[in-house]
Amino acid sequence: MNKPLITACLMCTATAVAAADLQEMGDMSKEMVARAVTHYQKVGREQAEKDFNHKSEDWYAEKYFLHMFAMNVDGTVWADNVWPEFVGTDFTAAADFDGFEFGHDIIANTPQSGEVYQVQLKFMNPESGDLTPSVGSCVRADAQNILCSWANG
């Protein structure tokens, strides 16, 4: 087998694995945010804020650093159990490492109907510091609050 063909095959394999990982990341984040909305509606914003800001097994998984994030529709972050320094910040102009303004995008595109809005971006892996794909699944828990679950590659 010649060298260019081997390189091409390896690149195809890496892409397929990455696509499978992205699908799994999306599925996991959708499942977590669905549980989070149910929890929020059951216990209310105040208790949900306390719960979503802790790395309990309900709201954090080591695989893909799956975690919870929440903000008001004005962009003020009130929960992030992996990046606590984001709590209290304005995410309306937050951008990923490619310049995609995902904060504004999430606020503008998460449906009022309770359907999941999914977004993919490039973010820093919390453990390695490497730039990796990140998948977020976001739902409006009510008229004023958006809950997201994020998975980082």
Image (cartoon, rainbow, N blue to C red):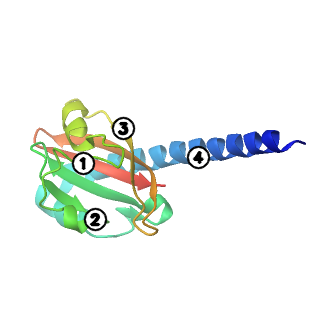
Q: Kindly report which numbered mark, 4 or 3, lies closer to the viewer in this rendering.
A: 4
Q: Which of marks 4 and 3 is nearer the N terminus?
A: 4
Secondary element type, mark 3: strand
Is residue 3 shown left or right of residue 27? right
Residue 40 in percent (x, y) is at: 21, 52
Q: Earlier in the sequence, mark 1 or mark 4?
A: 4
Q: Which of marks 1 and 3 is nearer the N terminus?
A: 3
The answer to whether the residues at label 4 and label 3 have Cβ atoms under 8 Å apart is no
Q: Kindly report which numbered mark, 1 or 3, lies closer to the viewer in this rendering.
A: 3
Which residue corresponds to the image point at 29% horizontal and 48% vertical from the top-left? Answer: 148
Residue named by callout 1: 147
Residue named by callout 4: 18
* Dot 3 amino acid type: Gln
* Dot 4 amino acid type: Ala
Which residue corresponds to the image point at 76% horizontal and 41% vertical from the top-left? Answer: 9
* Dot 2 amino acid type: Trp
Q: Which of marks 4 and 2 is nearer the N terminus?
A: 4
The answer to whether the residues at label 1 and label 4 have Cβ atoms under 8 Å apart is no
Residue 80 in percent (x, y) is at: 25, 61
Q: Distance between the residues labelled 1 and 3?
A: 12 Å
Secondary element type, mark 1: strand
Residue named by callout 3: 118
Secondary element type, mark 2: loop
- Callout 1 environment at 10 Å: few (<14), some (14 to 19), or many (20+)? many
- Callout 3 environment at 10 Å: few (<14), some (14 to 19), or many (20+)? some
Q: How far apart are marks 4 and 3 (CA)?
A: 17 Å
Disc on res. 22: none
Disc on res. 83: 2
Is residue 150 shown left or right of residue 3? left
Secondary element type, mark 4: helix
